[in-house]
């Protein structure tokens, strides 16, 4: 064990105390400063109680939404194909034709995301404008305000069956035993009632509790998302300290039950409340199918890159092996003809588009997909049909034979006692009956 001097021990203790003080928050009542500018209030550095759960803003909607949509690698792939068609030396068909489908898909997805985010905005607006009771020193009573008006350091009164608008340090309750019952189903799904006790030695259970009589300083820990942990102490003017824990904290989102009313001191508001810190906010949710599709797109791109590289290399070797310039290679206006290496480079990007069209050509000319009865072939009416092939893994059919060919055969009938039979089918029927007997 290493020996240390008393001075070093005192220095370490002071250093540890300063470190602990950095993790604490000093709060004061807003009542003495009511009516002053927010910048002159002691709790002006803490956020308000208004919340915002929307993902987008009006100005940044388009870039943020496109950034999220391009998390789908398939969108990047089709945008790349559309861009390649705008390059004259590698374009295979009209560039606008390739641009229309991806623009329609991105636009419809953006409209869907905008609609969902607008519903979040409406929900936030409704929640922020929910009425609550905040004590006013000027009015000498609790007045009706909105949730968005609640500030750290305010005194809020919550009546029975009302939702707590912010994290409140319980100072008073109508119950003679100083107990407040709350329901936390909005936070943890539990419907059984839980008890919260007001701080002992700070306030008394008196129907005429006056928030102006509270002149103590509240020192609590910094905001965290632990719903079951809270440390706090109240320092009275005579320097006496009274501690409190999670049993004296009313969390935002809880509902007061079986208690006429309760009064609390706001310690955390808005996005610093424990409920909001546990809410990770809106995020881009990717399904299992989408993640798998991204992986498949990567493998498809690797395969396409390999095929285009082989085609470009073959084009380069073929041009080099030609004894002269063939007549179908037309030079530009200056009479200049691209070198085999440059032509092979251009062919690499051209093959990206041509291979997709080539797959469709082989599909339409596949002899196994030809119907001899109607002398018809497969008609490919969409360029992206090749992306849909190979995704069928199972075919389910009921026992009635939906996929079989059902034919009705005339065998015999009886009209006014006279039997009419088809000879061939009737003979077959008789043989079937005899074999069955």
Image (cartoon, rainbow, N blue to C red):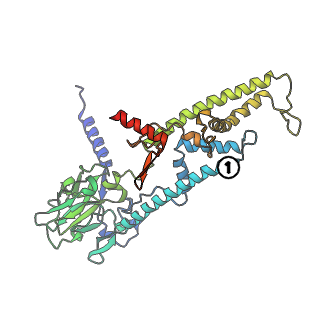
Image point (69%, 50%), residue name: 96
Q: Looking at the picture, does residue 234 appear above or below residue 68?
A: below
Q: Quadrant of residue 86?
A: top right
Q: In this view, does 276 lie to the left or right of 329?
A: left
Q: In this view, does 400 lie to the left or right of 422?
A: left
Query: Can residue 285 be spotted in the picture?
Result: no
**Which quadrant would the C terminus be assigned to in this image?**
top left
Locate residue 403, reporting x and y percent.
46, 41
Q: Which of 3 and 181 is in front in this view?
A: 181
Query: In the image as oriented, which residue stretches furthest toward the left?
Result: 177
**Which quadrant would the N terminus be assigned to in this image?**
top left
Image point (46%, 59%), residue name: 117
Q: In which quarter of the image is residue 147?
A: bottom left
Locate residue 196, reporting x and y percent.
18, 58
Q: Looking at the picture, does residue 258 appear above or below residue 357?
A: below
Numbered marks: total:
1
Query: Can residue 358 be spotted in the picture?
Result: yes
Image point (50%, 59%), residue name: 114
Q: Is residue 407 left or right of residue 4?
A: right
Please rate how many residues cluster around mark 1, counting C-alpha atoms within 10 Å: few if below 14, some from 14 to 19, many from 20.
few
Mark 1 secondary-structure assignment? helix
Which residue does the numbered mark 1 point to in the structure image?
97
Q: Which of 369 and 288 is in front in this view?
A: 369
Locate residue 235, reporting x and y percent.
22, 58
Locate residue 72, reporting x and y percent.
52, 44
Q: In which quarter of the image is residue 28?
A: bottom left
Q: Which of 371 and 166 is in front in this view?
A: 371
Q: Looking at the picture, does residue 25 appear above or below residue 311?
A: below
Q: Which of 183 and 405 is in front in this view?
A: 405
Image point (31%, 53%), residue name: 274
């Amino acid at each position: 064990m290493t020996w240390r001097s008393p001075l070093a021990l005192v220095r370490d203790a002071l250093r540890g105390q300063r470190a602990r003080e950095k993790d604490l928050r000093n709060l004061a009542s807003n009542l003495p400063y009511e009516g002053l500018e927010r910048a002159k209030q002691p709790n002006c550095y803490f956020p308000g109680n208004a919340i915002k759960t929307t993902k987008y803003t009006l100005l940044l909607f388009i870039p943020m939404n496109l950034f999220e949509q391009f998390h789908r690698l398939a969108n990047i792939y089709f945008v790349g194909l559309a861009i390649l068609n705008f390059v004259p030396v590698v374009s295979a068909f009209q560039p606008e034709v390739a641009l229309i489908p991806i623009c329609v898909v991105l636009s419809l997805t953006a409209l869907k995301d905008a609609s969902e985010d607008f519903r979040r905005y409406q929900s936030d607006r409704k929640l922020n404008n929910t009425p609550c009771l905040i004590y006013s020193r000027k009015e000498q009573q609790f007045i009706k305000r909105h949730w968005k008006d609640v500030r750290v350091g305010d005194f809020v009164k919550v009546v029975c069956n009302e939702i707590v608008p912010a994290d409140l340090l319980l100072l008073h309750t109508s119950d003679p035993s100083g107990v407040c019952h709350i329901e936390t189903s909005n936070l943890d799904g539990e419907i059984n009632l839980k008890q919260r006790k007001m701080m002992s030695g700070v306030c008394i259970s008196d129907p005429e509790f006056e928030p102006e009589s509270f002149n103590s300083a509240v020192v609590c820990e910094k905001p965290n998302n632990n719903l079951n942990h809270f440390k706090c102490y109240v320092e009275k003017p005579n320097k006496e300290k009274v501690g409190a824990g999670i049993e004296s904290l009313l969390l935002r989102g809880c509902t007061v039950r079986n208690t006429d009313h309760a009064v609390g001191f706001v310690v955390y508001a808005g996005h610093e409340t424990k409920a909001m810190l546990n809410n990770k906010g809106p995020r881009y949710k990717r399904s299992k199918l989408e993640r798998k599709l991204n992986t498949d797109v990567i493998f498809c791109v690797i395969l396409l890159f390999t095929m285009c590289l082989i085609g470009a290399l073959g084009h380069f070797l073929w041009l080099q092996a030609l004894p002269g310039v063939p007549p179908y290679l037309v030079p530009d206006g200056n009479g200049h003809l691209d070198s085999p290496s440059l032509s092979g480079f251009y062919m690499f990007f051209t093959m990206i588009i041509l291979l997709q069209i080539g797959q469709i050509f082989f599909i339409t000319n596949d002899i196994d997909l030809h119907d001899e009865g109607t002398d018809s072939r497969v008609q490919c009416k969409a360029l992206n049909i090749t992306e849909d092939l190979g995704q069928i893994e199972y075919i389910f059919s009921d026992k009635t034979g939906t996929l079989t060919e059902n034919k009705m055969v005339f065998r015999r009938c009886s009209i006014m006692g006279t039997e009419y039979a088809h000879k061939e089918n009737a003979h077959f029927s008789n043989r079937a009956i005899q074999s069955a007997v």
